[in-house]
Amino acid sequence: MTTDRSDVKSHALAAIDRRHDDLIELSLALHRDPETAYQEHRAAERIAAFLEQSGFAVERGYAHLATSYRASATGRTGGPTVAILAEYDALPDIGHACGHNLIALMGTAAAVGVRAVLDGLPGKVLAIGTPAEEGGGGKVALVRAGGFDDVDVAMMVHPSSRTLSHRTSLASNRVDVEFYGRAAHAAAQPDRGINALDGVLQTFNNVNAMRQQLKPEARVHGIITSGGSAANIIPEYAMAKFSVRALDRRYQQEVLERFKACAEGAAVATGTRVKITVHENSGYENMSPSLPLAERWSTHLRSLGRTVATTMDDERMGSTDMGNVSQLLPAIHPYIGIAPEGTPGHSTAFRDAAATPEAQENAIAAAKAMALTTIDLLTDPALLEAARAEFEEKRKAGVVKGRN
């Protein structure tokens, strides 16, 4: 294999083009067959088999997560280990309305492109399947299990209605709040009951009052999942699910404690008993993107004929468990536009867009840019050093945690 970087990159892009139709069929197969968090058995096997056929050694059930995998390939000795991540879980009820079928396409395509030229390059490439991004925290579980301990750099690309080289995200936790009361006939014996639903409703009222004193980027939102069985029975059990978010983890934890006080106060006011469950794997850190890597990905995407928008200070954002990875090592999570600007994520409109020919082609371009960025990391020590230096500066400033 030639080591001329331009030839290497041409060979990598050609390898992606050779699998073009297969990659798109993979994406559409996932879209037609959505599976939710930690249930993505068919999706994980489809992708793992694809990578295995492309020359990777595949470990299924990586880090004891049944729907995770780690596909590895090694080039010459020396060089960094670069992880290219994939997500493939769908949303309940509305399927791939976050476009994770395209994330799987992009991660797989980029890995296939790099694998085609890796034998002549120094370093190692990993394609890691990360389940349950939609609230289940697959990457959180992988981080906790040491799944990124031997990784130098990690990357993935997310579909959006705009193409961006980088964006931050909100730190978040998923929280269940359950209230316990006492059932009674709501008309004949209301004084003998304790209304668990009142505890839930008062929690929402307390949160609404708290919002006035929160920083603008904080978010607390929830749904009622159980509120009783009949109008003439005072509910003895009620439950709500909340998401508590903020721009950085430290303030998010402060908001979380205040949220708990809202629920506890509601219990006191209504005479109910409350149980608050903060889900460990849903503890999403805020994303801190590696700007040297994001800029290199953006440069490659532009060279492929795509326009990259300028990231604004007031970008709308959600949460991602990729934030937890970015707190440990240099990582990027850029966005590729696959729908008209303004199309909301987690909507049926975005779900439908994620299966269009335009979305597939834009995803292929984003994957090629990711493959080219990976090759740069393997062949250009200056890029890797720039990413590491920026990360160390952020660690000293307390912006990221780094490895313990």
Image (spheres, rainbow, N blue to C red):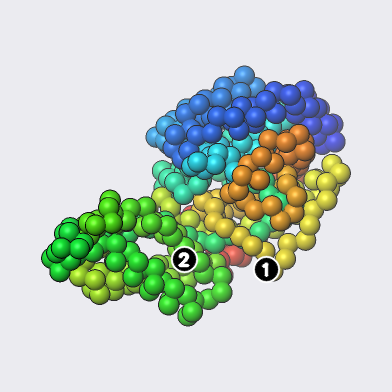
Quick check: can you spot residue 328? no
Looking at the rendered structure, the secondary structure element under dot 1 is loop
When asked about the image quadrant of residue 314, the answer is bottom right
Quick check: can you spot residue 109? yes
Picture coordinates of residue 395, whole percent (x, y): 55, 64
Extreme-front residue of the structure: 188
In the rendered image, the vertical position of residue 92 relative to residue 289, given as above or below: above
Picture coordinates of residue 279, whole percent (x, y): 37, 53
Residue nearest the viewer, comparing 237 with 283 = 237
Q: Amino acid at mark 2?
A: Val
Q: Which residue shows up at 73% across the image and 44% down it?
A: 338
Looking at marks 2 and 1 on the same chain, the residue that comes earlier in the sequence is marked by 2
Mark 2 — residue? Answer: 220
Q: Determine contact: label 2, label 1, CB under 8 Å.
A: no
Residue nearest the viewer, comparing 234 with 167 = 234
In the rendered image, the vertical position of residue 275 relative to residue 102, given as above or below: below
When asked about the image quadrant of residue 64, the answer is top left
Q: Which mark is residue 169?
A: none
Extreme-top residue of the structure: 53
Mark 1 — residue? Answer: 314
